[in-house]
Amino acid sequence: MIWYPYTQMKTLDAPIKISHAKGVHLYTEDGQDMIDSVSSWWSVIHGYNHPEINAAISGQLEKFAHIMLGGMTHEPVQKLSDKLAQWLPGDLDYCFFSDSGSVAVEVALKMALQFNTNRGSDRDMILSLEHAYHGDTFKAMEVGDDEDYHFAFGVNSEKKRGVVHIPTEIPALEKAFEEYGERLTCFIVEPLLQGAGGMRMYDVYFLERARQLCDQYDVLLIFDEVATGFGRTGNRFVADLVLPDILVLGKALTGGYIGHAVTVANRRVWEGFMSEDPTHAFMHGPTFMGNALACCAALKSIELFEREDYISKIRRIEEITRREMLGFTDPRIKEIRIMGGCVCIEVYDAKVLEGFKKFAYEHGVFSRTFLKYMYAMVPYVISESELIQILDTMKMWFR
């Protein structure tokens, strides 16, 4: 029996069985053709069954699929690390690989905590955002702020200690640093776009002020760009606009082919672990970190992103989306938000969205609403007509 995610198994509707996929299309066992409007949880940016990524993985598979990084290394992981160091802004040059976004966030938080321990600091607090979502592992849940995902563990109750949540407002940011600045190890954010917290969007000025305050109070700034990286906000990375100390990437890192993630630190953080003292080493090591197949997929994914000018594709997606949603209103809709490759319709009452998944299926679109949010995060290779079909389906639901 498969135990499915975020689902009450007793009342589970039968999952849609997919037989094959190509481009932005998913084909079901019963012959239905669906456009994937959510990119398999925002990861499949190049579409499915891409021939060049397929070939990159197949070529590596003939050599070996995986070897551990404990005491060994290999060309794909070295090439990916070098590429990321060259590709990412500033001195974000030091790559610690893992196997999922949640684990990569755990690595970032653990890195920030030990960075302070190694230098003899007794800082004991983390600053995070309201409505934050950073994954489902325990420390990631602790810095998250969404009881709809984590209520069973009490991490969002008044008993939570050591984590402060603030809204994306500069006065609240400044107050938090005034009150807790000397105790903070780090400030972790999903920059510009909060995904699972409701596709909430905010201004870059907040991040610019956060960078200033982190410098003033000697606090590490962590960007969780698992969802926002690789163009989703319309920027290659938000880190190109405001430079963090630690950057977390996942999802689209491999083009959605294989679970893989990376926590990238700047030189200052890296040097905080360089010591003759063995206790200053970073004691973490996921079995599948630096997986050779994943590294080859990531290298080809980055090559495609650069060569095919994906930022222009994303700008076109945003332009079409704004055009098609212009003037669309309904009394049940609270707000429509658009940024880069993301569009979200927030309704007042979650019951309004009940049945939309089946409706979308009948109109040739795969969609997965959550809570009060109907959204699309499409693959970047989508055509204009395919994108319009998704947006028309979203609008038709309200008509």
Image (spheres, rainbow, N blue to C red):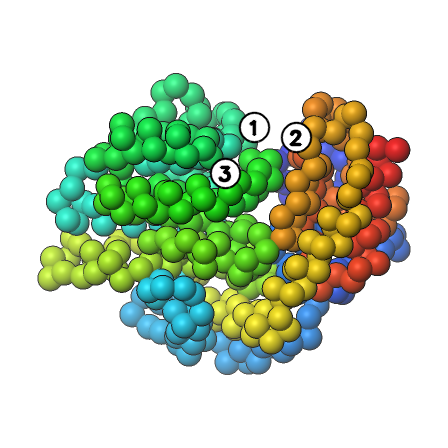
Q: Amino acid at mark 1?
A: Asp
Quick check: can you spot residue 35?
no
N-terminal label among 1 and 2: 1
Cβ atoms at labels 1 and 2 below 8 Å apart: yes
Q: Position of residue 5 (x, y in %)?
A: 61, 40
- Seen at 49% across and 69% down, the residue is 295
Q: Is residue 342 left or right of residue 249?
A: right
Q: How many marks?
A: 3
- Seen at 58% across and 52% down, the residue is 233
**Label 3, on which residue?**
133
- Seen at 50% across and 80% down, the residue is 63
Label 2 residue SS: loop
**Label 2, on which residue?**
371
329 is higher (above) or lower (below) than 274: above
Q: Position of residue 316 (x, y in %)?
A: 70, 60
Cβ atoms at labels 1 and 3 below 8 Å apart: no
Query: How far apart are the alpha carbons under marks 1 and 3?
Result: 11 Å
Front residue of 135/60: it is 135
N-terminal label among 1 and 3: 3
Query: Crowdedness of circle 2 by 10 Å Cα count: few (<14), some, many (20+)?
Result: some
Say which of marks 1 and 3 sits in front.
3
62 is higher (above) or lower (below) than 47: below
- Seen at 53% across and 61% down, the residue is 236
Label 3 residue SS: loop
Q: Amino acid at mark 3?
A: Tyr
202 is higher (above) or lower (below) than 100: above
Q: Amino acid at mark 2?
A: Leu
Residue 155: which quarter of the image? Answer: top left
**Label 1, on which residue?**
148
Label 1 residue SS: helix
341 is higher (above) or lower (below) than 197: below
Q: Is residue 337 left or right of residue 271?
A: right
